[in-house]
Image (cartoon, rainbow, N blue to C red):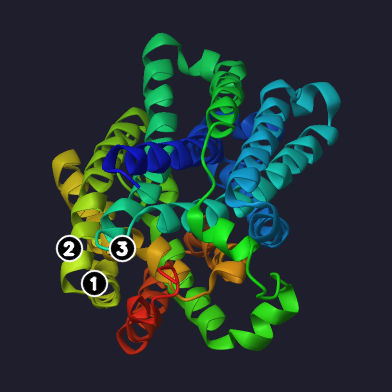
Amino acid sequence: MTPMGRVRAILGGSAGNLVEWYDWFAYASFSLYFAKTFFPKGDQTAQLLQTAAIFAVGFLARPLGAWIFGLYADRAGRKAALTVSVALMCLGSLMVAVVPGHAVIGAAAPAILTLARLLQGLSVGGEYGASATYMSEMAGKHRRGFWSSFQFVTLIGGQLSALAVLIVLQRLLTPAQLGDWGWRIPFVIGAALAVVVFAIQMGLEESASFEAAKASPLPRSTTLGLFMKHPRETAVIFVLTSGGSLAFYCYTTYMQKFLTNSGHFSKDSATLITAGSLVVYLLVQPLLGLLGDVIGRTRLMALGFTLGALTVWPIMTTIASTHSALLALALICAALVFLTGYTAVNAVVKAELFPTPVRALGVALPYALANAVFGGTAEYAALWFKQAGQEGGFFIYVAAIMAVAAVTAFFMGDPKGLGLIDD
């Protein structure tokens, strides 16, 4: 593959990732405004707790989506799985955009919201495995960490785009207008972008690895075969994802609420601080992906998790006590740089653990299971500790899970030496 051909494949394969995660994070970014539309009773913490519960419900659908789309990507192709998943996300976003509030249809409103999040969970669960596999297979042998890091570049880009829409709407609309109807605008935008990306992905080339596997006599991807033949690899991905996802949602989606609910910042300031930290987080992904190619990707993971586990408590407690937006921004950026040791190279490390016929399912399913258990419940757990008056317990919880991931990364060995993608 020529350098320009590789760039086109990486950008095309990641375009759907950006839209998928824009839609996914639009829910978290705008929940401060629409929580009372669906849950009118209780104070702000109680309303956010209920929207966080529905956010977690979406994660419960992700393992099912990972299973369905993982099998589909291994049998029908990475390109086919990517296009179907982005179409499903479009449907979920449209449902959120048009559903009436509790005042109009009563309990049916949160029920429909939950259904929309389930559809989005299916979509995102399927997107990760297909995207990680496709980009790792198209990345080339020598700079695979660098090229596959763009999966998280687009993931962060999706979250940053959702925050950018929020910042613009905060400038154009009053808080009352945002709470009444303005929060629906980002979901309309997400549905429209999904249509554009669907057209782009229809023109992608399938990966050479999949085409070669399709013509080989190797057995097809099966769920039983994954757990029977690759139990160690599946467990490793689950543990690594547990630490990475919990920390990711702590420092990104929950951080905006933490700054206002536990810190001393307004909603507008919290949005700007979060957006600034995400810009830094996006920019360092390729740099640390390249560093992983040089020093070893699992070594980079172990270092990032170790630094992250050691700094959760001081970073979060300092943010909660400071009135300085610059200090809060610097601390969040430091935490995200440590986390980049995992996020920049996680896709390729996981993909290199599996042979081609089972790669998409092997990457997607344990990742989605760990996300459902640890990532999807991060916000809910944080708010639960907060409501119980033991907020520090959440910081200890995050540090402990990251420490387990650090030990796992240190002892897992380097899957690059297996050469499974190259073969």
Among the 4 quarters of the image, the one containing residue 179 = top right
Name which of mark 1 and mark 3 comes first in the sequence.
3
Nearer the viewer's eye, disc 2 or disc 3?
3
Q: Mark 3 sits on what residue?
A: 141
Q: Residue at x 35, y 60 (%)?
A: 343
Whole-angstrom CA distance, mark 2 to mark 3, is 15 Å
Nearer the observer, 254 or 95: 95
Q: Tell me if I can see residue 249 in this picture.
A: no
Contact (Cβ within 8 Å) of mark 1 with mark 2: yes
Find residue 58 and report its horizontal and vertical position in percent: 66, 50
Question: From the viewer's perspective, is residue 205 above or below residue 319?
Answer: above
- Mark 3 closeness class: few <14, some 14–19, many ≥20 residues within 10 Å: few
Q: Residue at x 27, y 43 (%)?
A: 3
**Residue 259, placed above or below residue 201:** below
Q: Label 3 is placed on what type of residue?
A: Lys
Pointer 2 residue: 291
Q: Look at mark 1 in the image and give the residue it sits on.
A: 300
In the rendered image, the quadrant that contains the C terminus is bottom left
